[in-house]
Image (spheres, rainbow, N blue to C red):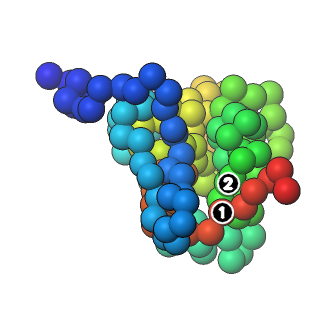
Amino acid sequence: MDVNEKRTSKREESQMVPQPVKGEAGLVQVDTTWGIIQPLVVAKDIRAVDEIEINEFQEKRLPIIDARTTDFYDVSTIPGAKNIPHNEITERMNELDRDQPSIFFCNGPQCPQSQSAIKNLLKAGFPPDKILYYRGGMHDWVTMGLPLENKKQ
C-alpha cells in the first residue's frame, strides 16, 4: 500500500499553508489532507536543506526561490524569497544566479511545485550544484513559528 493511501481522507476545501488560530498567539491550524507526500530526494546531486541553512542564506542575502504560484506567494512567503513559479522556471532561468546555489521551496512536504521546478531546471541544463531543495516549505516554516513576509501589504 502506498503511504499516501494511508493518509486522512481529503477535505472538500484544502488549506495548503498552516493558518493562525484567532486569539491564540503561536498556535496554527494544519490541514493534513491535501497533496501527495513528496520524496526527500528530488534527483541525483540535489541536496535537501533545513531551516538553519535558509537562515544562513537570508543573513548572507543568497537566493531563496519560492516556486509556488504567485497567488500563494502574494499571501505570505519566507522573508527574502523571490517568486519564480514552477510553471515559469525554464522561461525565467536567466533570473537565477549561476554563481551561487539557490534554495527552492513550495507549500511543504506534500506539494510537488518545487520538485517540478527543480526537475525542469535539470532538464534544461541548469547545474545541479546550484540547486538546493527545502522540502519542508511553507508548512514546516510556519509550524516552527518562523517569520513570514506578506507581499500584498
Q: Secondary structure at mark 2?
A: loop
Residue 89: image quadrant is: top right
| Mark toward the start of the polypeptide (1 vs 2) | 2
Residue 41: image quadrant is: top left
Q: Residue 149 at x, y = what percent?
A: 72, 61
Q: Quadrant of the C terminus?
A: bottom right
User: Would you place residue 70 above or below residue 78 in this image?
Assistant: above
104 vs 73, nearest the viewer: 73
Amino acid beneath label 1: Leu
Residue 97 in sight: no
Could you tell whether 113 is left or right of 30 in the image? right
Could you tell whether 30 is left or right of 58 in the image? left
Could you tell whether 149 is left or right of 151 in the image? left
What residue is pinned by disc 1?
A: 148
What residue is pinned by disc 2?
A: 77
- Residue that appears at 71% across and 75% down: 60
In space, the residues marked 1 and 2 are separated at their CA atoms by: 6 Å
**Circle 1/circle 2 CB separation < 8 Å:** yes
